[in-house]
Amino acid sequence: MPLMTLPAGTITCVFTDIEGSTALLKRFGDRYRDVLATHRRIVRDTFAPAGGVEIDTQGDSFFFAFPRAREAVAAAVEVQRAHGRAAWPDDAAVRVRIGLHTGEPTVGDEGYLGLDVVRAARICAVARGGIVLLSETTRALVGSALPEAVSIAPPDEQRLKDIDEPELVYELRIDGVEVTPAPEPPAPETEPSGKRPKTGRRLQGFARA
């Protein structure tokens, strides 16, 4: 891709992928080709008219860059809605994870480079199917200009792979779009009967320090 086609300066990086794509491939076999084709058509036909530039695609994953955060968010919401409306084989749930981050990545010989790109990809990786996650920077730029029937959940602190500090991420709540439920939290560890925890006094000491 010629570098002149890339949005310059501050951009919003958008990463998407299909949740559970390997399981879908096993389930559908050769029919997965049609699932993938429909998914790719939805993403490209939604992002491109909104100003998104396709930077990379690998399998069911996409990396797009947008000059403006608001257009990126609106397009991401529409991609989720379009996947929800699509007719999938055997009425399967084909859900997409989408992560957005706004920054000023470096332009290299093969596209964008830098932690801003990594951060967007890692935000996508912690999303669940049907969900759009925004970085704190993207959330600030969007402000109150949300698409119709969309709200923003309170921020959630996430540890992202290869990112040193915890990140605040914001989940978009899109009316009418089903999402993959969050996993159940692990059960608390229990002490063997008749034994009391040995850490209580030590923790009280820290609290007084």
Image (spheres, rainbow, N blue to C red):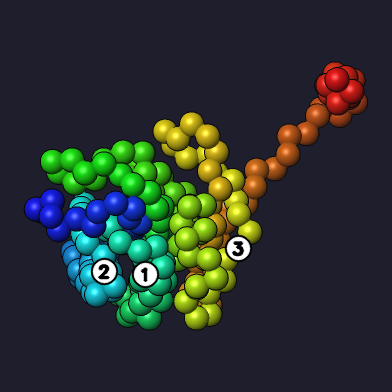
Indicate the position of residue 142 as horizontal and vertical percent values.
48, 65
What residue is shown with label 1?
71
Q: Residue furthest front?
A: 9
Q: Are marks 3 and 1 in contact (CB under 8 Å)?
A: no
What residue is shown with label 3?
153
Give amino acid for label 3: Ala
Q: Are marks 1 and 2 in contact (CB under 8 Å)?
A: yes
Indicate the position of residue 194 as horizontal and vertical percent values.
90, 26
Residue 187 falls in image quadrant? top right
Secondary structure beneath disc 1? helix
Residue at the spot x=81%, y=29% of the render?
A: 191
Give amino acid for label 2: Gly
Measure how far apart labels 3 and 1 are at the Cα level: 20 Å
Residue 93: which disc? none
What residue is shown with label 2?
51
Give amino acid for label 1: Glu
Indicate the position of residue 40 as horizontal and vertical percent values.
23, 67
Secondary structure beneath disc 2? loop
Residue 17 falls in image quadrant? bottom left
Residue 110 falls in image quadrant? top left
The quadrant of the picture occupied by the C terminus is: top right
3 vs 1, front mark: 1
Indicate the position of residue 91 as horizontal and vertical percent values.
37, 76
Residue at the spot x=35%, y=64% of the render?
A: 68
Measure how far apart labels 3 and 2 are at the Cα level: 26 Å
Measure how far apart labels 1 and 2 are at the Cα level: 7 Å
Compared to residue 69, the image places residue 58 above or below, namely: above
Secondary structure beneath disc 3? loop
Compared to residue 3, the image places residue 175 above or below, namely: below
Q: Horizontally, is 180 left or right of 101 in the view?
A: right
